[in-house]
Amino acid sequence: MTSKTAIRHLKNVWGKVGLGEIPTPDETMDTLRLSGRRRKRVKSDRTAQMNLRIRPQEKDRMAVIALREHVSINELFSRMLNLYEREHGKAERPIRDAGPAK
């Protein structure tokens, strides 16, 4: 494909999606600058992965709540676990019987 053909094709596609004029090369330079709303992502100490099967509606609800609270779904899950333990008591591993005392 020649450059002219590629540009003609791009103009055709660009117009179909309603983006108006194609930006000039100068307008497309240095577009990866950080925006003024820079937020540094905090590294997590999470190292274990857990895969869940939940209803699509539940996943959607979790995503909406996470978006509303400005947190990840992982953080939302952690908060939900803390709230559950506050309501129903901490989850503790059962102590294994060491056998008869000697």
Image: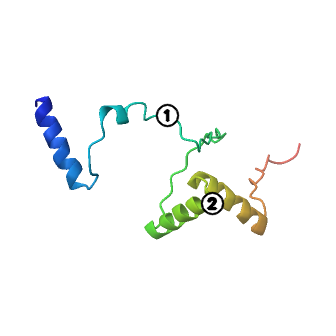
Q: Position of residue 65 (x, y in %)?
A: 58, 64
Q: Position of residue 90 (x, y in %)?
A: 77, 59
Q: Position of residue 77 (x, y in %)?
A: 62, 57
Kind of residue sitting beneath label 1: Arg
**3D distance between C-alphas at marks 2 and 1:** 27 Å
Q: Say whether residue 46 is left or right of residue 54.
A: right
| Residue at 59% from the left image edge and 41% from the top image edge | 38
The numbered mark at residue 33 is: 1
Q: Residue at x 26, y 43 (%)?
A: 22
Residue situated in front as seen by the camera: 81 or 43: 43
Residue 63 falls left or right of residue 14:
right
7, above or below 70, in the image: above
Left or right of residue 24: residue 63: right
Amino acid of disc 2: Glu
Residue drawn at x 19%, y 48% is 13
Task: Name which residue lies at 11% across and 29% down.
Answer: 2
Disc 1 crowd, CA 10 A, few/some/many (<14, 14-19, 20+): few
Q: How is the image coloured?
A: rainbow
Lower position in the chain sequence, tag 2 or tag 1? 1
> What secondary structure is found at the residue carrying circle 1?
loop
- Quadrant location of the N terminus? top left
Please, what secondary structure does the residue beneath circle 2 have? helix
Q: Which residue is mark 2?
A: 69
